[in-house]
Amino acid sequence: MASPTQRRISLGDFRHEALSETSSTNSECLARARAGDPGFLWVTAERQTSGRGRRGRAWASERGNLYASLLLIEPAPVERLASLPLAIAVAVHQAIRMVLPPGSAPLEVKWPNDILIDRKKTCGILVEGERLDDGRQALVIGIGVNVSVMPDSPLYPVTCLREHGSAVSPEELFAHLFRSMAEVLDIWSEGRGIREIAARWRDVACGIGEKITVNLPDRSISGQFVGIDDNGLLMLKTGAGKMMQIAAGDVFFG
Ligand code: BTN
């Protein structure tokens, strides 16, 4: 529950610009931020010509899927920002759950914020930040959901909503996301609501208790995925029984 001094977030705070084509909705949002946009701006595109994924990978962006980015300005004090990816994942999971038929395969979140159906990736999220010339911190949350197109990936198995019986369009899915993101960011409350967010995240998380390998930029570490702490860090119990906290990396099961 927000205290009287806390700013509540509601649907009316957000604007949306729908583009037919752009290089990357994340780049669009960053350009708006540099030009002075106050934030709470969604940019969507039917197609991206240079969609970006994590770790410098390309994100295939043909028509038929959802490409959406949300610009936030000064979203939270820096020490509370680590939990934002969990909040984003909870919001995207909620939106996708609304459009899948009852009884479909498990819809889960893979740490920190990939969304999987039946353990295959259907959504990737790329968070990018920039300190603007005027000192403000801009943060862009880029969300790509495979709605009806399934790009090939040599790295992990992929799926799309269509494959699981959903006839939703990218525009309809975005309408759900617009709502769920406003609701979840209000609960997250600039990081003050992390306990509630972490609890919701754990409810839909994939692989807690299982053996995983985490690829870090310079090495891979294997161990048991114990869970997440209240800052959103992954807790990994390694062979020596040592508990490690990991802030960023790619998780592989088994
Ligand atoms: C990942 O590698 O899993 C993250 C993929 C993020 C893709 C989305 S699509 C909308 C936004 N614009 C981009 O260029 N990337 C993100």
Image: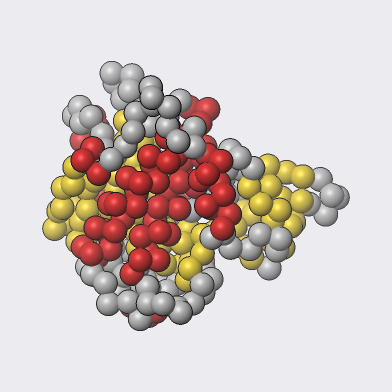
Tell me the residue at 20%/27% (across/down).
36
Residue 69 coordinates in the image, percent (x, y): 29, 48
Tell me the residue at 16%/47% (across/down).
17
Color scheme of the displayed model: secondary structure
Q: Identify which residue, 243 or 188, lies in the foreground.
A: 188
Residue 230 coordinates in the image, percent (x, y): 61, 40
Q: Identify which residue, 185 or 153, lies in the foreground.
A: 185
Tell me the residue at 26%/72% (across/down).
168
Q: Is residue 146 left or right of residue 109?
A: left
Q: Is residue 58 left or right of residue 232?
A: left
> Where does the C terminus fall, quadrant-wise?
bottom right
Quarter of the figure with residue 72: top left
> Where does the N terminus fall, quadrant-wise?
top left
Q: Is residue 62 visible?
A: no
Residue 177 coordinates in the image, percent (x, y): 31, 55
Q: Identify which residue, 137 or 94, lies in the foreground.
A: 94
Residue 169 drawn above or below residue 125: below
In this view, the residue farthest toward the right is 240
Q: Is residue 93 visible?
A: yes
Residue 4 coordinates in the image, percent (x, y): 38, 24
In this view, the residue farthest toward the top is 134
